Image (cartoon, rainbow, N blue to C red):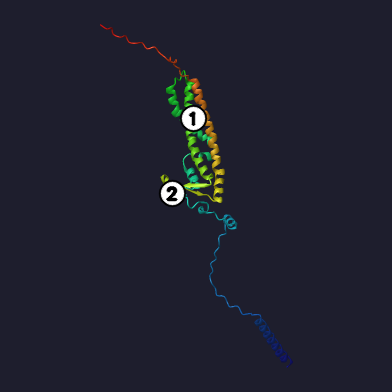
Amino acid sequence: KMQATFCRARVRHRFALTGLLCISLGAHGYAPRAQALPYHSTSVRCASPTSKERADSQAPPPPPQPTAAAFSQSEVPTEQQPTYELRELRTEAFFTWPERDGFQTRLVYIWLPATLVVSMPIALSTYDVQQQLPAALLAANVGGSAVLVAFLLRLRAGWGYVSERLRTKQTYYEENGASGRGGYVVKKEAALAMRDRLLDKYEVQPPLGKIDAALRIAVSSLVVSFGLLRLVVRVPTLPPEPAFRAVPTPALPRPF
């Protein structure tokens, strides 16, 4: 009897503990986990970004570039803007030579063919090689130097025109290219005038300096060669004629 009582007390104690445990779990929001259904998952592995992509993503965005309309005159046609004329000048043949290294070496490519191919045959056919060889060489140099001076003057005219257009405070333009009907003048704004002066100082004046230095050398060579040629080749001078010369009078016929 005592054993049966002890068993009943033990069962009641277990039921009490189970009830307390359920009440505690319900207060904390516990819910039994539903059984997960089996499924087949496909894992996708993303490619890791390269070092260039990481550098591009970390680099700050570039500053906004000013548009062409912000630094141009709306009244002036595009092809008559000084900056547009500078870009067009650089697309012409030979006009980019002063901006590159070895400008003097490239000028030799102009002077040498003009001297050997054009001037030398003319000089050799004009002077006797055995007796007047120095004169023939000087004459050939005169012809080659003249061609080089003409080439440099053409470069100087193009770059000088662009420099003048950039340095002036006003822009001259012609409407629809009608030069016969005159043109118009528009004053540059302060920022635009400053931009043009900086372009002239740092992009136009250095090529102009190279052209002027080469032009001085070419003109000096032309003048010296021409002067020496005049000294070497002496033109014989004729004796001066007398101011008055006696003219014989014709004999008159005798009267009968």
Residue 35 to residue 134: above or below = below
Label 1 packing within 10 angstroms: few (<14), some (14-19), many (20+)? many
What residue is rendered at 47% in x and 23% in y? 136
For mark 2, give the secondary structure: helix
Q: Answer whether residue 69 is visible to the viewer in this image.
A: yes
User: Residue 14's spot in the image, x, y percent?
Assistant: 69, 86
Q: Number of marks in the image?
A: 2
Q: Answer left or right for 249 relative to 155.
A: left
Q: Answer left or right for 128 relative to 193.
A: left
Numbered badge on residue 175 = 2
Numbered badge on residue 184 = none
Mark before the other along the chain sequence, 1 or 2: 1
Disc 1 versus disc 2: distance between alpha carbons?
41 Å
For mark 1, give the secondary structure: helix
User: Residue 147's spot in the image, x, y percent?
Assistant: 47, 32
Q: In which quadrant will I find the C terminus?
A: top left
Label 2 packing within 10 angstroms: few (<14), some (14-19), many (20+)? some
Disc 2 marks a residue whose amino acid type is Glu
